[in-house]
């Protein structure tokens, strides 16, 4: 099997260049489309608000005329101010309403009293409407819209908050007796454009990440790996090895045609050798045996050489990414969705019940993961991936149709079964493909794909839910999960197995001790799981998945904004995790990174619990991404290294038990936060959780330190 890392050859160089150039093109195209979309939205938003203002002004006009019909003079109409105040308070985009004489002398006003009435601004509003009507050409339309867009940014424009609409004349019996001006809130316009900008930015980032995943896989499968096979054949033939390379031809491109030609040349040479050998053997057996030595030297025995590129980490990237994306779509609003379906359950508090689906989800994953690990070794990772789709898709559809909290618990449990099976199958696939020397990098690929999917799914799910509701998001998840199954069916290799586990199986399952019984005696494994893996998951599910959505909504953020903020966690982990993995591979300072990352996560929760603001939570989420990015890949590599000498336990089983142990923390997280929220605030629960992590990490530090001292003394 071919390792995912490639040497500094023409293959890897071409791979980097193709991916880099393609991503640059995608980014440029996305930025241009983003700018165009913002300009168009800005150009259409203000006219829409002005039309709404005109409709409101016409309604006021009709009410004024009713008073005139009753014989009340215009200036003597009573209750106009409270009437106008009520209209302004009803619409967030209105700041004030002026009712003037035909000569722009103020008669009535409603709304914000802080704005000084200025007749010159009324004239500018009328002139501005006339000037805007002259902009007709496309270039002028775009230029005008772009300048308006710049005027709304913090770096350009005078930032005048009120934007007057063109006046509506008040007429009665054909005579103009006044005008109505409505002041639009420029900050409202800026806020709406800001929301649109961030939504488009999220989509842009998602497009880039998805493009990167697909481009990387397509380049590797259709360009780099075929070139690698060409290099392999030429290298072997230059070393007098004319064996044929196994090759599955995808389609008739030039590289694959070259591979076929080189293989056919080897086959032709082998056929000639075979005929010549038969001719020599019929005349002189001794000479034939000498001739066979020549055939072995040049590998002309007709043997098929297995290519080293039959299975790769690349195979699992896209299926894992698409399925994880489907699962993460609901993460930004799941506590809010459960809150809508709340009903008392077993006397638990509301906060405990809101966290219950997350806890049940993690509990089921913890229960299924050990079995999934052994199933992967028995049935194969590809078959297991496809099997896991059935409970996952069923769970998504069931959640979309849920009527109460019990439905959510049942269907999230179904999804959890599929999630556990699919993730452990992909993790086992990667572990079986990579070599011992590149294990941390291989696990960094796994973590990086999950984080990319988490970042995209969480943010996109929040945007979709904010616009069309919670229920449709689950149907969308089901569709993406089905797409992941099709990709896995096409891309995953069926013959990938954990060789170590296969040997153990051949020895006899009845003679093999329980994997859990073996690993529980491994001090390094137990220490890593108890003091790092479990606490990290407590923070992830308790603070990030449960507390953050509720806390942010309590501070006034929308579902879309919550998704954007939660996206930062994965956005930070994506670059940090590979850096930490490379650091571990070079220095082997696993314990130091684990301790530092855990201390950092606990400390930031304590510190930012004192600042009950949205920006404090933004900083906490971002820094938590740094802390967990430091821990994730090195932790997996450290666990694999700690269990390397356990001959009776396969890699997939080790990963399965690690995942099960992590899910213990995942179950504890929301239940712990729910219990804390029963008697304290969001900030208080956040600070207490941080303090708990600090205590656990300090205990881990002292245990590791004492262990190192004992090893030194014994040495």
Image (cartoon, rainbow, N blue to C red):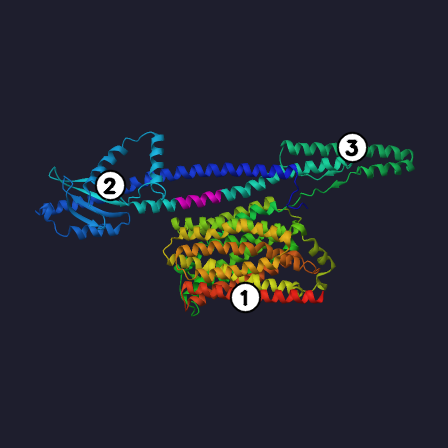
**Disc 3 element:** helix
**Disc 1 element:** helix
Q: Which residue is mark 3?
A: 269
N-terminal-most mark, 1 or 2: 2
Where residue 55 appears, as percent x and y from the top left, is 23, 43
The image quadrant where one finds the C terminus is bottom right
**Disc 2 element:** loop
Where residue 531 appears, as percent x and y from the top left, is 57, 64
Where residue 330 appears, as percent x and y from the top left, is 46, 53
Residue 344 image-quadrant placement: bottom left
Cα separation between marks 1 and 2: 61 Å
**Residue 22 lies in magenta, yes or no?**
no
The residue segment tinted magenta is 197-207
Select label 3 or label 1 by which is in front: 1
Residues at badges 3 and 1 in contact (C-beta under 8 Å)? no
User: Exactly how many numbered labels are in the figure?
Assistant: 3
N-terminal-most mark, 3 or 2: 2
| Towards the viewer: 431 or 340 | 431
Where residue 12 appears, as percent x and y from the top left, is 63, 39
Q: Which residue is mark 1?
A: 696
Select label 3 or label 2 by which is in front: 2
- Residue drawn at x 71%, y 67% is 714
Q: Above or below — where is 422 with respect to 209? A: below
Q: Which residue is mark 2?
A: 165
Q: Residue furthest bottom?
A: 347
Select label 1 or label 2 by which is in front: 1
| Towards the viewer: 119 or 38 | 119
| Towards the viewer: 369 or 399 | 369
Q: Is residue 57 visible?
A: yes
Label 1 neighbour load within 10 Å: few <14, some 14-19, many 20+: some
- Residue drawn at x 71%, y 58% is 504
């Amino acid at each position: 099997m071919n390792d995912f890392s490639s040497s500094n050859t023409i293959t890897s160089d071409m791979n980097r260049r193709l991916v880099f150039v393609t991503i640059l093109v995608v980014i440029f195209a996305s930025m241009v489309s983003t700018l165009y979309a913002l300009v168009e939205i800005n150009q259409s938003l203000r006219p829409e608000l002005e039309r709404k203002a005109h409709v409101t002004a016409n309604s006021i006009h009709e009410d004024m005329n009713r008073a005139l019909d009753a014989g009340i003079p215009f200036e003597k109409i009573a209750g106009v101010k409270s009437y106008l105040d009520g209209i302004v308070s009803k619409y967030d985009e209105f700041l004030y309403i002026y009712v003037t004489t035909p000569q722009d002398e103020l008669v009535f006003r409603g709304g914000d009293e802080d704005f000084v009435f200025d007749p010159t601004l009324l004239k500018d509003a009328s002139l501005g409407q006339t000037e805007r009507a002259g902009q007709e050409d496309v270039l002028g339309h775009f230029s005008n819209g772009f300048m308006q867009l710049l005027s709304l940014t913090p770096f350009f424009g005078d930032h005048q908050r009120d934007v007057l609409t063109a006046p509506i004349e008040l007429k009665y019996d054909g005579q103009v007796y006044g005008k109505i001006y409505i002041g639009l809130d420029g900050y409202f316009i800026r806020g709406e454009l800001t929301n649109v900008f961030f939504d488009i930015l999220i989509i842009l980032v998602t497009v880039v990440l998805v493009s990167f995943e697909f481009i990387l896989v397509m380049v590797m499968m259709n360009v780099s790996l075929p070139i690698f096979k060409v290099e392999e054949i030429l290298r072997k033939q230059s070393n007098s090895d004319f064996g044929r390379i196994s090759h599955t031809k995808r389609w008739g491109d030039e590289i694959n045609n070259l591979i076929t030609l080189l293989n056919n040349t080897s086959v032709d040479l082998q056929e000639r050798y075979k005929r010549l050998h038969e001719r020599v053997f019929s005349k002189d057996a001794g000479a034939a045996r000498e001739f066979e030595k020549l055939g072995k030297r040049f590998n002309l025995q007709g043997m098929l050489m297995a290519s080293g590129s039959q299975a790769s980490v690349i195979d699992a990237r896209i299926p894992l990414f698409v399925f994880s994306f489907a699962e993460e779509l609901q993460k930004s609003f799941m506590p809010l969705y459960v809150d809508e379906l709340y009903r008392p359950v077993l006397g638990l508090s509301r906060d405990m019940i809101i966290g219950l689906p997350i806890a049940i989800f993690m509990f089921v994953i913890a229960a299924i993961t050990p079995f999934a690990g052994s199933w992967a070794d028995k049935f194969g990772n590809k078959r297991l991936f496809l099997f896991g789709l059935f409970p996952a898709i069923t769970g998504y559809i069931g959640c979309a149709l849920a009527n109460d909290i019990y439905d959510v618990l049942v269907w999230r449990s179904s999804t959890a079964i599929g999630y556990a099976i699919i993730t452990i199958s992909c993790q086992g696939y990667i572990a079986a493909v990579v070599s011992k020397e590149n294990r941390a990098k291989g696990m960094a690929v796994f973590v990086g794909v999950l984080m990319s999917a988490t970042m995209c799914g969480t943010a996109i799910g929040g945007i979709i839910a904010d616009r069309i509701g919670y229920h449709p998001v689950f149907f969308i998840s089901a569709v993406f999960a089905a797409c992941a199954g099709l990709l896995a069916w096409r891309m995953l290799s069926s013959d990938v197995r954990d060789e170590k586990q296969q040997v153990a199986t051949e020895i006899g399952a009845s003679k093999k001790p329980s994997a859990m019984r073996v690993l529980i005696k491994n001090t390094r494994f137990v220490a890593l799981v108890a003091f790092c893996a479990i606490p990290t998951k407590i923070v992830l599910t308790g603070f990030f998945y449960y507390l953050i959505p509720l806390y942010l909504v309590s501070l006034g953020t929308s579902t879309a904004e919550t998704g954007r903020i939660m996206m930062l966690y994965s956005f930070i982990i994506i670059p940090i995790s590979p850096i930490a993995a490379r650091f571990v591979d070079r220095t082997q300072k696993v314990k130091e990174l684990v301790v530092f990352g855990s201390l950092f996560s606990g400390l930031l929760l304590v510190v930012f619990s004192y600042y009950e603001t949205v920006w404090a939570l933004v900083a906490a989420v971002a820094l938590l991404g740094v802390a967990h990015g430091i821990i994730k890949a090195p932790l997996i590599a450290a666990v694999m290294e700690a269990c390397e000498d356990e001959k009776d336990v396969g890699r997939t089983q080790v990963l399965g038990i690690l995942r099960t142990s992590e899910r213990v923390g995942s179950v504890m997280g929301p239940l712990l936060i729910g219990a804390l929220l029963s008697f304290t605030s969001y900030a208080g629960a956040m600070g207490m959780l941080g303090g708990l992590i600090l205590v656990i990490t300090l205990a881990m530090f002292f245990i590791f330190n004492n262990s190192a001292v004992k090893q030194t003394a014994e040495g």
